[in-house]
Every structure is written in C-alpha cells, then in structure tokens.
Amino acid sequence: MNNINVVSLAGIAVNSILMGITYVRFLTVHPLRMGWYMFFTTLFLVTAIILIAVKFNGWGIVGASVLAILGFLAGYIWMTKRLLAREDPRPIPALTRKKDDTGLGHTAVIYFTHGEPETYDPIGWINQFNEFDEQKIPFVPLVARPFFIYSLRRSYLNVGRSEHRRTHLRMVKALENEIRKSGDTTTRFYISFLDDNPRPDAAFIHALNEGASRIVVAEIFVSDSNHTLEGKRLIEEVGAHDFGVPVIYTGPMYDSEIMHSMFVERVHAHMNGADKSKVGILLVGHGQPDEWDREFATETEHELLFRNKILDRFEEAGFARENLSLAWMEFKEPKPAPKIEEFTANGVEKIFYFSAAISADALHSQWDVPHLISKARNPRNIPIINLGAWNDDPIAIQAIREKVYAAMQR
C-alpha cells in the first residue's frame, strides 16, 4: 500500500469518527444548535464519500467504505457514552441544621412529583438510563439512546414548551390555600421534582434548614414505582433520622376515591346534553415495559386499579360499560386509536379521553396521547374531546389535601 493510500485511509478514519461524534450531537443538542451539527455531519459524510471515490477503486473502495463505517460507529458510541456520563447540574443546598436542633415545631409538606423541564433538557432521561443500567434493568440499547432523546426533543418542538412545571406550581399553591382555609397557618410547603429543579433531596434539606419538626412527603403520582422509590432514596440519603424528624409519605393517588370522582365530574361538565349511553370514555395510561413489571410490578398494578375504579364510577353514574375502556400510551396494548375505532363502530356520538396517569399537563398529555388518538379512523367525524391530565382541578387538589391530612394523622 502506497503512502497516498495510507494518508487517505487515515483521513477517512478521522473524518468518519468526527462524523459519528457530530451526528450524536445533532440528535441530542438544544434545538438552536442542532443545525450546526447537521451541517458538520453532512460535511464529514461528503468528504468521506469524495475521498473514497477519488483515492480508491475496486476492492479498495469496499475496504475504505468498511473503515468509514467502523470509524463512524466508534465516534457514535464514544459520544453516546460521553453524553450518558453527563453530570446532573441541579444544585443541592448545604445542610446547615445542627444535629441537636429539634426544630421550630412546624410541619413541612414536600410536594413531590415527576417533573419535566419547561424547555428541552434530556438530563432526566440520562439519569433514568443510568439508574436502569446500575440495576441491570434492560431499557433501550445503548446505540438507540440518542434516537430516544431525539424523539424527546421533537416532542418539545411540536408543543413549544411543557406546561408541567407551571401547572404543578399552581397546584401546590392551591393545596397550600386549601390547608390555610382549615386554620393551619404554620405548615410550610416546598415543591420538588424528580426530573426538574429542585430535586426532592434539595427541597428536603431546605425544609430541615428552616426548622421543620415533622415532614410529610406528598407523592403526586398514580402508583408506587421506580419514580417514587428514587425520590425516597434521595430523601433518605439526607439522613433526617439524625435530627429526630419523622418523615411520613402520603403514598400515591391510585386508591383515592376523591380522585376517581374527578374524572366523572369533569365529563359531566362537558356533556352539553349528550346521551350517556352514546358517550365513549377512554382512559389512557402511561405503560411500562414488561421487563420493568418484574422489578416494579406495582406501577402497572396500581395504574390498572386506578383506571378500573374510575370506569366503575362512570358505570355507576349511568354510562354504558361497553363504551368505557382503557388504553396505553406506550409499551403495552391496546393503543388508543383501536379503542377509538371500537367506540365509533358501537355508534357513540361523543368521545372523551384522559391522559389518566399524568398529574399535570406534560409532553405526554400535550402531544403524545393526542397524536396517538389522531391516528384513529373516524368516518362519522364524531367529536373526540381531550380532557387532559389531572391539573389543578379543585377535586384533584381536594384529593391531595386528604392524602396530606391522613399522613399528618399518622
């Protein structure tokens, strides 16, 4: 092999590695920067093609092409691993409370929920990938993870921004107002998110530093799951027992009869005189892979129990059972579109659907579930009405308040 070919092969290898790196960056960076990385990925691709076409012929083209593919994969995998090694930038305050400090006598409520950044930031999913890898739970192969994050970014581009954070801020304020109405003027409230700022351990430290003598963690989730377990782990690592501060968890919302009733009341408010026997109700759950069910069985169990209790409420309220159904957003069947088509075939005249497992409007309820619903064939153009996530519905706030009160009694 002559010196020209050696130099050309080296150029192809370096060029292809850089192409793999910039392609991962294109898939995962902030939308304002993705254009530059697409430009450089294209530039490296064109350069590799030109080098192979000009400098090689016959079997040399095959060999150089294989080298280019291997170089691309090396750069792609290296950049993917570097992406997944990104540190969580969310700040954790210093714990300044002394261990012999018994506190100021008040209760702190840590409002803890899933969380979703208002604008695109993949750190929540990066943390989730790493958590599952540590626990040896299979979820999305390494090479596919940049595409998973790309899909997340595309959802943000479709909706503009997530309303999740703003809605939960309204919800925790509404919860505080409800508890103040009962005459409680001392309980303090702190919001926290698993995948947004502040984290539950940060909020917990804040409550300790401000002298809380008892802490209630309000778990604004449908089910016990890896999410609630991770929140508990972060909180317990702070070491509240060192201060003699009792920590009480409310438990998730799946068994709240008040929350079950909210769905029925919301449909009633949007009926506009429709015949109940001609109304379809679809409760769309989140869903998780079957592999996760072996580790976190309660997530699926609680989500099913929650939604079936709601369907029972609808039947008791006079809706036809054959027009009440469940669907899953991802990982499980059935999906929403076939269920919508079943309703239309049954002769319904109006359909309501909920993102039943979503506590506050997020990408799932703003885009993913409506997009899945839009795939249904609807030849009679029956109205299909999105009643969204729980949000700051007064009944939802009442349900959360009752969970908090019950925890305080414990």
Image: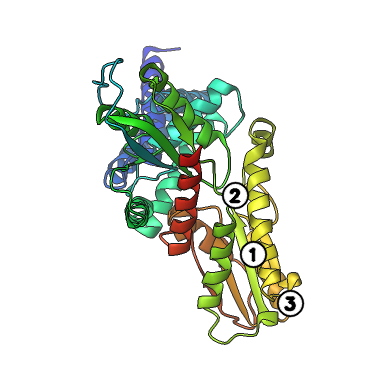
Secondary structure of residue under mark 3: helix
Along the line of sight, which residue is nearer the eye, 307 or 376?
307
- Spatial CA distance of label 1 from label 2 is 25 Å
Q: Are marks 1 and 2 in contact (CB under 8 Å)?
A: no
User: Residue 187 at x, y = what percent?
Assistant: 32, 43
Q: Which residue is mark 1?
A: 337
Looking at the image, tell me whether mark 3 or mark 1 is earlier in sequence order.
1
How many neighbours does mark 2 have within 10 angstroms: few (below 14), some (14-19), or many (20 or more)? Answer: many
Residue 144 visible in the shown view: no
Which residue lies at the image location 50% right of the left edge and 53% below the top edge?
Answer: 358
Residue 107 visible in the shown view: yes
Type of the residue with mark 3: Ala
How many neighbours does mark 3 have within 10 angstroms: few (below 14), some (14-19), or many (20 or more)? Answer: few
Q: Which residue is mark 2?
A: 254
Type of the residue with mark 1: Ala
Which residue lies at the image location 29% right of the left edge and 15% below the top edge?
Answer: 100
Q: Is residue 198 above or below residue 329?
A: above
Number of numbered callouts drawn: 3
Q: Which residue is mark 3?
A: 345
How many neighbours does mark 1 have within 10 angstroms: few (below 14), some (14-19), or many (20 or more)? Answer: many
Would residue 303 be found to the left or right of residue 95 on screen? Answer: right
Q: Is residue 106 above or below residue 205?
A: below
Along the line of sight, which residue is nearer the eye, 139 or 68?
139
Looking at the image, tell me whether mark 2 or mark 3 is earlier in sequence order.
2
Would residue 87 be found to the left or right of residue 404 on screen? Answer: left
Along the line of sight, which residue is nearer the eye, 400 or 347?
400
- Spatial CA distance of label 3 from label 1 is 12 Å
Type of the residue with mark 2: Tyr
- Spatial CA distance of label 2 from label 3 is 31 Å
The residue positioned farthest toward the bottom in the image shown: 273
